Image (tube, grey):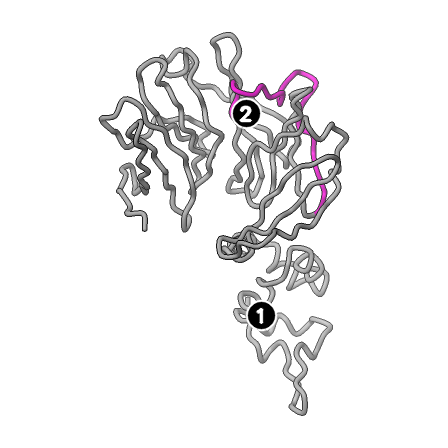
Amino acid sequence: MSTNNLQSCKRKKFLHGHGRQSSSIDDLGLDILVYEILIRLPAKGVGRSKCVCKEWLSVLSTRHFAMMHCRHISTSYNQKFIAIDSRLCSVFPLSCEDSGPLLNSRILLPFEAPWNKVNILTSFEGLLCVCFRNTGKLVIWNPLTRAFKEVSSSNSRGLYKPKSDAIGLYVDKTDDYKLLHIKRRRGRMWVHVYSSMFDSWHKITFANKLRCWRGKPIWSNGTFCKGVLYFLVNCFIENKGVMLFGFDVESERFRLKTFPRFPHAYYDGNLVIVHKELHVFITHGLPNWTVDLWRMEGESWVSCRIK
């Protein structure tokens, strides 16, 4: 989009200097305007900026801008964590440099549920998946806008059971935010996907007869990276170690992935995204624990040195 398309915007003067000639949007250039100014706005500011003109609405509504904006506000100096207490939700800034008391802001929980029965299961691009422990119902919640959607259906889809089920949030190529729910009951497994665009669930067909699905493995919640939702499965009870499964969000199929192996009798892993790449922290060497960081490259893993 050229800068000439922004001439229809109502504001002719974007910046005003003191004692200098004022500058217009055309002088700034589209790249500077979007990726040096608008990207630094808080989410509410971006929402208000969409009302300036149709051109701004088009640019600020793209998936690319959303990812860039999310990455910018997720920098180390602007990260936050949420703690639920009573009917209020406390939002704390996350700082590794400041050892002083944490100053928090508080927002009211928008849904009716006992505060001590609310569990935050996972997050993705500002959205949270919340479970009500007393009912098992799943809710997708945006703490910034306070909007939420209860996704559990009348046919028992979207009912979560702690220590048995696993979930994962992701987005597909149509910008449809989805929730994958792996349900385990009486030695069997079912997989369903909820679509926020269509407000409906559909069932995923997979090889339920495979040995790796049986027994009582411990599943992690999903970590989304480059079109794949990854799950770590702890199968030490059946002497299978840790396995990594990937759910391709376009083909909607599971696939067993490679995973670093260790000679120790017991080890565990935690998936993280660093610079848009999938990494895993692995603890091993009981009783003297050692922590290693590995990065996935293609279908293999490369060891990273932790400084």
Sooner in the amino-acid sequence: mark 2 or mark 1: 1
Left or right: residue 29 compared with residue 260: right
Q: Main secondary structure of the magenta part?
A: loop
Classify 166 as above or below 303. Answer: above
Left or right: residue 259 compared with residue 198: left
The percent position of residue 116, horizontal first and vertical second, equals: 68, 28
The percent position of residue 207, horizontal first and vertical second, equals: 41, 16
Under mark 1, the amino acid is Leu
CA gap, disc 2 to disc 1? 40 Å
The percent position of residue 223, horizontal first and vertical second, equals: 46, 36
Under mark 2, the amino acid is His
Instruction: Name the element at disc 1.
Output: helix
Label total for image: 2
- Quarter of the picture containing the N terminus is bottom right
Identify the residue at horizontal 42%, vertical 48% (top origin): 276
Asked which quadrant contains residue 89, the reply is top right
| Residue located beneath label 2 in the image | 181
Q: Is residue 147 magenta?
A: yes
| Residue located beneath label 1 in the image | 33
Which residue reaches farthest bottom? 19
Specify the segment rendered in magenta.
Answer: 145-166
Identify the residue at horizontal 53%, vertical 18% (top origin): 183
Structural crowding at the residue carrying mark 2, measured as other residues with C-alpha within 10 Å and reported as few (<14), some (14–19) or many (≥20): many
